[in-house]
Amino acid sequence: MTTEIQTETTEAQTTRGKVYVIDRGRTKLRAGQGLLTGLEVVFRHFRDALTRKLEKPSQQTGVFTVQYPEERLKLPEAFRNFPILLYDDETGQELCTSCFQCQRICPPQVIHMTQARDPATGKPVPAVAEFLIEYDACMSCGLCAEVCPFDAIKMDHEFEYSTDVHGGLTLNKEALNRPISYYEKIAPTFWAEVKDSAMKKLQGNMKRRPDLIGVAPQMVEKIRAQRAAAAAQAPSPTPATPEAAPADKAARLAAARARAAEKAAEATPEPAPDSAPIDKAARLAAIRAANAAKKAEGAADEVAAPATDSAPTDKAARLAAIRAANAAKKAAAEGAPAAGSADFASTPSDAAPAADAAPPASGMPADKAARLAAIRAADAAKKAAAEGAAPASDAAPPASGMPADKAARLAAIRAANAAKKAAAQRDGSEE
Amino acid sequence: MTDILRSWIGGALPDWLIVLIAYLLVTTIVLFYAVGNFIMMVWAERRVVARMQDRLGPNRVGPAGLLQPIADAVKMFTKEDIVPRNADRWVHLLAPIVALAPVAMMLAVIPWGRGWEPVDLNVALLYMVAVSAVSGVGLMMAGWGSNNKFALLGAMRAVAQLVSYEIPAVTALLTVVILAGGMSLLELPYMQAGVPIMGATILCGDPAGCSPLLYSTITSFPGSPNEPVQALDLGLGWWVFTPVGFLGFLVFFIAALAEGERTPFDIPEADSEIVAGYMTEYSGMKFATFYIAQYILNFALSALAATAFLGGWQGPGVAALANMGGPWVHVAAALSAFYLLAKIWILFFVMIWLRGAFPRLRVDQLMDFAWKLLLPLALVNIVSASLMVGLTQWTSAQWGGLISLDGFAPWQRQLIAVLVTAIINIAAAYWILAINQRPKQVEWDEEELIAAS
């Protein structure tokens, strides 16, 4: 009575993709044959549902239920829920440079970020200080991931975020950070497409990130420990050690640069007698840089070098050399104006120690800061003098042991304070 | 039960108290049996229909979701009992009771196993039919007492359906009455001993050489002049294997579906279309009572169908164990009870199967089906049943000399009867199906029409 029905449909590949051809059986059924065919179909479903699961779409029967918390379907790579931030597994460096592209494109405007700044100079660096995404208002459009030029923001597969704490859905950088290996796991082909360019860009950005800025918060301790370990390993005599070799090389490079800078400074024509100290200062800086480089080289040879010193020394040396060279070039180029400003403070001569003693993070040329401070101090002093206050003489630059720019700034502040005080006293006496 | 109690505590208590306690015990056991089955049926229905729809069904509460009915019961108990403001309070309250009570009463006369019958009533079939009709009053009360026009309409539909389908159901049961020569349900399983189709007509030629494991003493027809005979008994002489029984079973089972409001006849409470019909204004335990009533009605009707057509507790091995005597009788009783339960559950599975496969009928289709198909078939079946009895039991004198089959052996007479009734039933079925066919659509010749105009 019942008609023959194939249990499996046939698959056919056409130009428009896969087509499933389902045999619907006989269409002409009489006198209850349709009822029996229906019963047969239902029984087949019942029997198969007891024994197997529905696995491929060409299968007509079998349990299709996925017992969700215990069983999960494999999500497609392109599945997207909420954005996450990526950081490199080894260096801990975040891919994000806080370019604000995602914040600009975000339709519900749930992305907020602050750019990282060098603590010493206050200049922005290509890293993000804090990153907030309000997941509760995120519409999962994925535009942020699409627009990101550094492949730093990607769409996650995680979707179980239900909570009774509304504020808990605003995630900060630490909560958003995922290692690249995680993203590689959930979307291997997507990551493979962008991997090379993303890592290249990251390498470039890492060079402009001082110290631990740009390192994922959860990786900071680990990276610090790693660097310490690297420093301890560096003294090993074999240059094959990857940490020791660059240090050595860097130090030599720094020395070479310092020498080159020295030569350049010497080679510049000297148009005015005022330029002599500048030249001198530049030479001094170069010598100091060379010394520092030598010291770094020496440190590399020492067996029991202090753990934390080696890496910074190398970096500092390189930095000092570069700065010294810059200062020398600038001094040579600026010539007269620089000499003119030397009336207020012994700027050029102080520039070299400033450059040398400046913390490695310093982005601003030290001499400029010192000059600024001196100008401010002078102004304050003049103002104080004009107002008839006695303690204007405090504005004189003090102790030379301190880094010049700091001292100059201090002096300026003091002068300003004194001027204010004087003004206040005068006001008081008038009343 | 009464006898067991008498033998245990006969001296300590007056006899009337023992009888009372015995019947109370039996009632409790039967009701617990039914309710236990109800709970399992709710679970099984949900699980089975889920598999038919490629799902899993309830699987969270307890192992394989077995405690789901308990969870549902807890939910039902904790629900608010709402009575509409202008409802007839007493009718509203009594309706579920009136719906459930007759269903529970039906359980009293069913032989649950060999020798396990609560009450031996000689008009048990009549009692079943009469009592089950009362539950229609409960439905009407529910619709009326709710003071809700939709509930009332639903009740009227339900009662119309019950009344319509009672006629084919009772007519189908009439064939059983004719075959059995009486209305006692207790006798029915005994009469369905033997082998398929031939029944208990293959007699033992040599009374000394017949093993009691294969042959048992059969009284073929109450009040028949035939002497009890030793016949081959495999416990499979079910009437459903004969043409008369098969047609009767089909008609009765379909009518039972309608009476129990099962898909495809669940029009009164069509949950996807109307708001549960007469149960619209019921909530909590009152609603649950209707639910219980419906499932126990299905259970009782399955038991009745199994007893009347599928041999009841009859099955392979029961007679053999009973013939061994002694404690084996109790084993036979337990086995027979299992057989009946298995048959009930197979019928219940078929109900779920139909529910999984078929859509609901329209009201006009429902009525058509009852009056145009089931009733004629049942009426023809009565003729067949009468012929069956005549051909197998009647003597030449009873036929008035018209037909003389006295010279034939019982199995020959059975074979003749089966063939004759098969021809009648098949021919009738074809004929009735044919006249019920949709009239052929006239194909208009357009050109001719244009030419004519």
Image (tube, rainbow, N blue to C red):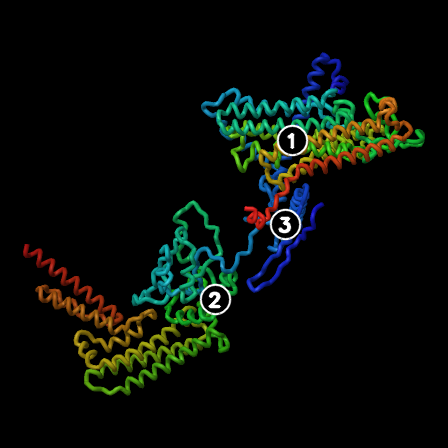
Name the kind of residue labelled 3 in the image.
Answer: Gly
Counting from the top left corner in percent of width and height, residue B146 is at 50, 25
The tag on residue A90 is: 2
* Vertical relation: A381 (above or below) A336: above
Mark 2–mark 3 contact, CB under 8 Å?
Answer: no
Image position of A425 (left or right of A329) = left
Image position of B256 (left or right of B213) = left
**Residue beneath disc 1:** B371
Q: Residue furthest top?
A: B14
Q: What is the chain letter for disc 2?
A: A
Which of label 1 and label 3 is nearer to you?
A: 1
* Vertical relation: A421 (above or below) B445: below
Name the kind of residue labelled 2 in the image.
Answer: Glu
Marks 1/3 same chain: no
Counting from the top left corner in percent of width and height, residue B151 is at 51, 28
* Vertical relation: A126 (above or below) B207: below
Cα separation between marks 2 and 1: 83 Å
The tag on residue A62 is: 3
Which of the 4 image quadrants contains residue B43?
top right
Task: Determine crowd level at label 2: few under 14, some 14-19, many 20+ residues with C-alpha closer than 10 A.
Answer: few
Residue drawn 61% across the image and 61% down it: A12
> Which of A329/B345 is in front?
B345
Task: Determine crowd level at label 1: few under 14, some 14-19, many 20+ residues with C-alpha closer than 10 A.
Answer: some
Counting labels gives 3
Residue drawn 58% across the image and 60% down it: A18
Q: What is the chain letter for disc 1?
A: B
